[in-house]
Image (tube, rainbow, N blue to C red):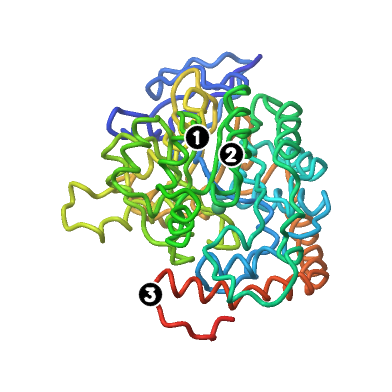
Amino acid sequence: MSTVWLLGGLCLLPTEAGHEVRRCDLAIDGPNIKAVVPAGDARPDPADEAIDASGNLIAPGFVNAHTHSPDNLIRGSAPNLPLELWSLHSAAGREGRSPRETYVAAMLGCIEMLRGGVTTVLDHIRFSPHPDPAGLDSIGAAYRDAGMRAVIAPVLADRAVVDTMPLDPADLPPKSDDAYGRGAMMPAAEQARLVDDFIQRWHGVEKRIYGAVGPSGPQRCSDELLQLAGDISLRRKVIWHSHVLETKVQREMARRLYGVSMIRHLSDLGVLSRRTNLVHMNWATPDDLDLVAASGAGIVHNPVSNARLGSSVCDLPGILARGIPVGLGTDSACCNDSNNLLETAKWAALTHNQSSPDPDTWVGPDRAMTLATRGGASVLGLGDTTGQIAPGLAADLVLFKIRSPAFAPLINPVQQIVLGAGSADISSVMVAGKFLMRDGRCTMIDESSIWAEAQELADRRLSANKSVYASAANLASATHAMYCRVHGLAYRKSHD
Ligand SMILES: [Zn+2]
């Protein structure tokens, strides 16, 4: 097999504390980096491909550790509201999807993320009302076709929406239980079997697609389902990935359901381990974080989505100080409204400066770069596979153009990437040694035809699902009244 050489690029190499930037020659053999040597030391064979990368800053590929690709087809459809009210608007747009819609939605994300330098993604796939094997296969096919590295976590949930929030029954409109989805849920064991079968079919495909289990949130699952997911994670050695303590409403619901904190409950159930991903954790207490640190579980931080939904700000400095593994996620394109991980890294670097005047606690750009790359890889169980430019790891790389606005002039590459760069500054992206974007063009996906089809599918689905929107709106008053109660706000009907 011939070697591909990237010659003379300014490479972000890992150090214990962060990164150092050196001009290097990179040798890439098949899917992996074979050697990293000082620029000028490479001795390519005549059969090798030698590429002049002296005009590039080369970073490890970014890891988007939390998104939901089905929401790529409802980008822009939900108003500026808190999570619980936002959910009523967004949920209906996902109903009744065909496998083709699911495939196109995933492809939209692949195009956007590759253009933004993301080489690895965790896709938390929500099907309504329960996992759909054909839809799941179409997601696997999308990542196989696009060439990205992907962890696919089908969402599990077996509690009706009205039973997941501390609603006052007196606020609910007079409807039968069935109208709220009670009794319509697929049994926990059946859902677990579907997901287990999916993992059996797709885990390890092309050595870059991985299965996982994705309980939607503890308050949306029976304890039986949470534990069945834990059993799969243990038996298959896959990630257990769930939204946890995203909002104050969820913290209240945990108290009502469990009588103890949500984290204490997960610990008592035995599902906290180094394969556990706790997504958000905005309302975790210091005791919760101590429990998480002792368990080895990781946290995925989604600062842009948290701001968009007004969910609050997690204690990222406190989480990092405890040595808890952290990755970054964009969350869905319906609550972000993008899959732009560079933007998320900038928010992670800067948001927490506002919580403390002490710069020693600030996250900063170099730390944010670490979280956006090897931090995310480690949280997803891929720390030995990707996230760093180092021999033996996958050749998952982002080539920034030094001749672009973000780097003119070039003084501090890491800071300028995290705080100043965007997708327009990226020329090429490689995953597993293959260029998926080269000189600004996706090599594996026909972008124009996917964008055109997405518009058609979205128009058709949003109009077909009008009645589903109407039924979701039925719960708006009760949800809004509950939200106001939890937050001590006066209830006004303005958002119903
Ligand atoms: Zn999410």
Q: Secondary structure at mark 2?
A: helix
Q: Which mark is residue 226?
A: 2
Q: What secondary structure is found at the residue carrying circle 1?
A: helix
Q: Which secondary structure, mark 3?
A: loop
Q: Are marks 1 and 2 in contact (CB under 8 Å)?
A: yes
Q: Quadrant of residue 179?
A: bottom right
Asked if 458 appears above or below 144 in the picture, the reply is below
Q: CA distance from mark 1 to mark 2?
A: 8 Å
Q: What's the distance in space between the residues labelled 1 and 3, CA to CA?
A: 32 Å
Amino acid marked by disc 1: Leu
Badge 2: residue crowd in 10 Å (few <14, some 14–19, many ≥20): many
Decide which of tag 1 and tag 2 comes sooner along the chain.
2
Q: Residue at x 45, y 28 (%)?
A: 274
Compared to 358, does 369 lie above or below?
above
Residue 431: x %, y % from top left = 60, 33
Residue at screen point 77% across, 54% down = 184
Residue 343 in view, yes or no? no
Left/right of residue 480 with respect to residue 408 in the rendered view: right
Tell me if the residue at label 1 has its CB under 8 Å from ligand 1.
Answer: no
Residue 85 showing in the rendered view: yes
Question: Which residue is label 3 attached to?
Answer: 488
Residue at point 83%, 53% (across, down): 98
Query: Which is more N-terminal, label 3 or label 1?
Result: 1
Label 2 amino acid? Leu
Number of numbered discs visible in the structure rendering? 3
Q: CA distance from mark 2 to mark 3?
A: 31 Å
